Image: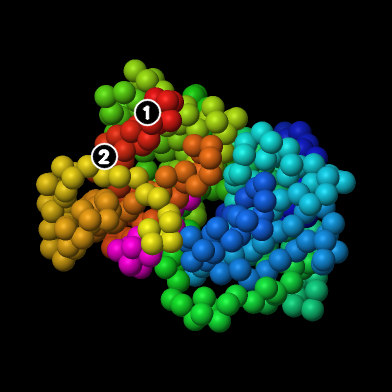
Amino acid sequence: MTDLVLPKTAPVAPGGRTPSTEAFPVLGIDAVEFAVGNAKQAAHFYASAFGMRLVAYRGPETGYPETASYVLVSGDIRFVFTSVVRAIGEEAAFIAGHVARHGDGVVDVAIAVPDARRAHALAVERGATGLAAPREAADEHGTVRTAVIATYGETRHSLVERTGYDGPYLPGYVHRRPAPAADARRPLLTGIDHCVGNVELGRMDEWVAFYNRVMGFTNMKEFVGDDIATEYSALMSKVVADSTRTVKFPLNEPALGRKKSQIDEYLEFYGGPGVQHIALATDDIVTAVRELRSRGVEFLDTPASYYDAVGERLDGTGAVVEELRELGILADRDEDGHLLQIFTKPVQDRPTVFFELIERHGSQGFGKGNFKALFEAIEREQERRGNL
């Protein structure tokens, strides 16, 4: 939502009033926007590697001389990639500065709401920092109302009300029709399951409280102590979610260990807190992984020994263990069902942002039974980079 960028302001104080207890309804994640060095090349990568479809564009040709933005979709997933064309204004300065400080990374996790004005008012009343006041934008496709609040690091949440709007993304964007073959394909990736944020040591509970207080999210899961630990490193994680479990935000902080954890590595290379990974839902993880591998997406390797016991977790599910072993897919079970998951390697040169593919069958968990195998795989990559 880079057209909404305003200078950061101090948090708006409640002025002694009792914060409203009115519900903060959310409809889902509207879009995830990335600030990148070259948006055209990033769009091509996500189209060719992840099978996403380019559907909208905004840039100098459409009356926006500072930046270029490409909108890609897959199922209900919407990614926006923005880069600087000419450093002539506030918007370009913000994007250029973000890329300089963090490399390619997530600048905005936009949340769809039924009433952007009310959502912004509630958030500010409850102590959130407002970055852009509610505003309207309209074109022949209808009207969209938006506002922006700050969260951890330089990440922000646009609050987007697009009831009845049938344009390609937002007013100011023009249609970019995908290739006919791409348009006809069943999407490999169908939705955003959750977005994970990494924060500094000692700040996790602060941001959990922020989502509890500002958005009325509740604590869904908690992983501490030996839940996420290996011989060398550890982290702590708590998951907050809206009442419908549509929007889920795990928040991680490093824990003391013998060596540098993946969270420490991320914070060092990203230059502070930010979105670590985005979990993308799929209805057929086997087909999705095969296809993405063939397109050049690199996934973390899983030791063959992991699969000696994985059949116990999948008892009665009909999953083919040998197929999972071949592709490196992880499996876990809880009281509600089971899930299958796999993680990519970082998708840029800095060891920061990566993706998860997840296929759920009843389970609302996050693969607790896979944590040790996953983190050992990440540590092997850290060691190869010289960062463990």
Secondary-structure class at tag 1: helix
Residue 272 in percent (x, y) is at 59, 30
Label for residue 383? 1
Q: Is residue 252 above or below residue 193?
A: above
Label for residue 369? none
Q: Is residue 108 above or below residue 273?
A: below
The residue sitting at 79% across, 67% down in the picture is 172
- Between 324 and 5, the one lying in front of the other is 324
Mark 2, residues whose alpha carbon is within 10 Å: few (<14), some, or many (≥20)?
Answer: some
Query: Which of the marked residues, 2 or 1, is nearer the chain's N terminus?
Result: 2
Q: Is residue 296 above or below residue 230?
A: below
Residue 354 in percent (x, y) is at 47, 46
The residue sitting at 38% across, 62% down in the picture is 294
Q: Quadrant of residue 244?
A: bottom left
Secondary-structure class at tag 2: helix
Q: Is residue 306 magenta?
A: no
Q: Which residue is mark 2?
A: 373
- The range drawn in magenta is 278-291
- Compared across the picture, whether 18 is left or right of 267 comes to right
Residue 4 in percent (x, y) is at 77, 52
The residue sitting at 52% across, 76% down in the picture is 182
Q: Amino acid at mark 1?
A: Glu
